[in-house]
């Protein structure tokens, strides 16, 4: 019988490769299943809301946030797909008592980093940061929603009629 002996440094070197492969598989599978091309590019830019919905680990955290806020993860995904395709999201209300799925999307958008040209180590560092931030948001969803709403409203005021330019507050 063969015995595999793993040292801590060997385990650490395997985890990033497994993480990257799993993220790549999740992005490709989700994109193929939903007819969304180009999701794999998130490996060099970091995960945005569509990437977070596509990757199993981040989607589980978003699902916990959605449940806490009374949102349907299906509606979060649908809204995210529309925004990814550049379709305007009109007549949505971002108030928690009206459209909690909009708040979940905003939490994801605020957690996303703005990166270009990430190498695999940079992606993994950002991925782990993102997961910590989403985990905190899952524990404190109302606080995360308030922070996201304030941040995105401030950012929306400086942009005219992008895909989310017609949100009502």
Image (spheres, rainbow, N blue to C red):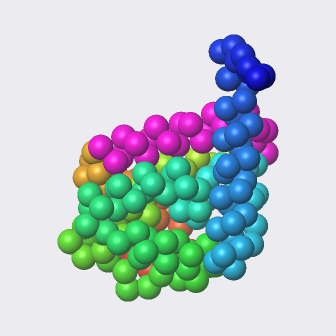
Left or right of 42 on screen, residue 49 = left
Quadrant showing the N terminus: top right
Main secondary structure found in the magenta portion: helix
Q: Nearer the viewer, residue 12 or 127?
A: 12
- Residue placed furthest toward the bottom: 91
**Identity of the residue drawn at 58% across and 47% down:** 113
Q: Is residue 133 magenta?
A: yes
Left or right of 88 on screen, residue 23 = right
| 137 versus 76 height, above or below | above
**Identity of the residue drawn at 38% across and 86% down:** 91
Residue 6 screen position, x and y as percent: 70, 18
Q: Is residue 164 visible?
A: no
Quadrant showing the C terminus: bottom left
Q: Nearer the viewer, residue 38 or 159?
A: 38
Residue 142 screen position, x and y as percent: 25, 52
Please give the count of numbered marks on the rendered protein.
0
Q: Is residue 117 magenta?
A: yes
The residue stretch that appears in magenta = 116-139
Q: Nearer the viewer, residue 7 or 29?
A: 7
| 33 versus 27 height, above or below | below
């Amino acid at each position: 019988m063969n015995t595999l002996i793993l040292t801590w440094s060997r385990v650490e070197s395997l985890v990033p490769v497994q993480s990257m492969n799993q993220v790549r598989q999740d992005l490709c599978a989700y994109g193929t299943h939903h007819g969304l091309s180009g999701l794999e590019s998130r490996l060099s830019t970091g995960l945005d809301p569509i990437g977070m919905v596509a990757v199993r680990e981040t989607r589980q955290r978003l699902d916990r946030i959605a449940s806490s806020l009374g949102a349907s993860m299906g509606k979060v995904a649908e809204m995210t797909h529309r925004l990814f395709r550049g379709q305007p999201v009109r007549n949505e209300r971002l108030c928690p008592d009206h459209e909690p799925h909009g708040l979940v999307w905003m939490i994801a958008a605020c957690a996303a980093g703005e990166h270009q040209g990430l190498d695999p180590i940079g992606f993994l560092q950002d991925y782990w940061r993102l997961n910590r931030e989403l985990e905190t948001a899952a524990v404190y969803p109302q606080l995360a929603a308030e922070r996201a709403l304030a941040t995105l409203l401030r950012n929306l005021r400086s942009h005219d009629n992008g895909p989310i330019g017609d949100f009502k507050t």
